[in-house]
Image (tube, rainbow, N blue to C red):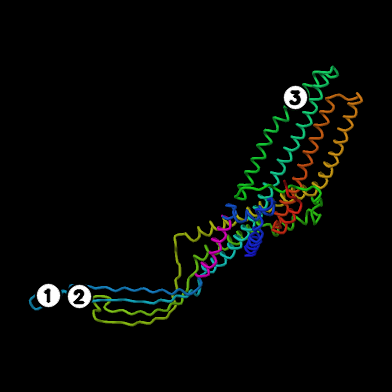
Amino acid sequence: MASRAVVSSVLALGLLWGGGQLARADDLLSLYRQALEANASYLAARAEADAQREVLPQARAQLLPNLSFSGSKGKNTTEQTSQGFYGPVTREIDYNSHNYALTLKQPLFRAYNFALYAQSKAQVASADARLEQALQDLAVTVGSAYFDVLLARSELQVNRSQQQAYEAQMQYAEKAFRAGAGTRTDVDEARSRLDLVKAQAIQLEYKVEFALDTLRTVVGRPLTPLSTLNPERLELVPPDPVRLEDWVEVAEQVNPKLRALRSDVEAAEKEVWKARSGHMPTVDLVAQRSDSKSDSNTTIGSEYDTKMVGVQVSIPIFSGGYVNSTVRQAQANLEKVRQQMEAMRREVGLQVRKEFDGAAQGVHWVKAYTQAVQSAEQTLFSTRKGFQAGTRNSLDILNAEQSLASAHRDLSRGRYEYVLARLRLMALVGRLDNEEMSRFNTWLEAGN
């Protein structure tokens, strides 16, 4: 139920915030809130959880008194044949009859119903955990789609910068060639580089459009201009706590997938209990009041008002081996779920290690890529100076331009990989909530 309260509060915040939505650019938080209201996969998971929660009142009902009423009323005709002095005599009798009964039944001992009630609690806990997992998955999906758009646009911007640099270099090479100070090779090399980045631009433009389509599909509406990542706002800090083992321990305790599977194991254990209850007697308290009149052709004209209170016991004796078979089946299913939980525990541990390393090492990667960009810019500057002095040629400038573009591209990828690693790490420990998404959102600034 806690996850349901979190979802409700998030939706309420979204409604309050939504009034000014049209006047500002979309950002990560606004699209996340929109997805909570419109994403079909998440809404389906929420409906599934609502449906699964109903198993608890249904199971509880099996332990409570059951009151029923039955009745019948009819017009009857019967032929009565009796032996007279001169032989058989037949006469036809018409009469009205009725039979009404009010029955109260209270289970006193039904092992199956007790197990069903305990099992339903585990099933509801599993449903709540799976809804929480759907909420974490939605946050990761929105975040991944959002930053995929920003990364694709960043790569396209790097490509366009390359095009401008190569076009300028080609124009310079052509001018130098016409003046007799350059070579045809310089012109051809510059044109070749320019044609290559133009071809890459086509692919990158498609990548941007596909990323935008993916994001639109996730949030279920058209997009306004997106806020972009501001490198100065980006928090380059290692995960807290700093020990990997602490993250793994927390994930094993609170990861929604593992919580759901632990509840599934408990439900499977109760299924074994239900199967074994087939060998146990059932005991019910029964109270009934009935009113009948002429309920058979032997009681025509007689009326009865009957009250009954008693205990009804049913003892199974032999069912052809059915109960033993269902017990074995339930035990096998229990073992299956236990192994699934163990496999998921190992998988979650591996995922935590991967994302922890991505977030921890990402701090160093981004700093290293930032230094690489500065070095590449200095190299390009020095190469251009050397070209003017006659110690470097046109190809050296093109290579320096290519190195600078690669450094910018690696820096952008490093930033987004760091952000996504942190995003996924928070989801693995069930902490990717509205507050955490707001924190990621502070790293963005409104785009143009």
Q: Identify the residue at horizontal 31%, vertical 82% (top origin).
A: 304
- Circle 1 — which element? strand
Residue 263 placement (x, y as % from top left): 62, 61
Residue 175, by quadrant, is top right
The three-letter code of the residue at mark 3 reads Ser
Residue 15 placement (x, y as % from top left): 63, 60
Q: What residue did someone put label 2 on? A: 94
Q: What residue did someone put label 3 on? A: 192
- Circle 2 — which element? strand
From this view, report whether residue 347 is shown above or below residue 265: above
From this view, report whether residue 393 is shown above or below residue 80: above
The three-letter code of the residue at mark 1 reads Val
Eye-nearest disc, 2 or 1: 2
**Residue toward you, 108 or 23:** 23
From this view, report whether residue 109 is shown above or below residue 443: below
For residue 208: magenta? no
Q: Which mark is residue 89?
A: 1
The three-letter code of the residue at mark 2 reads Asp
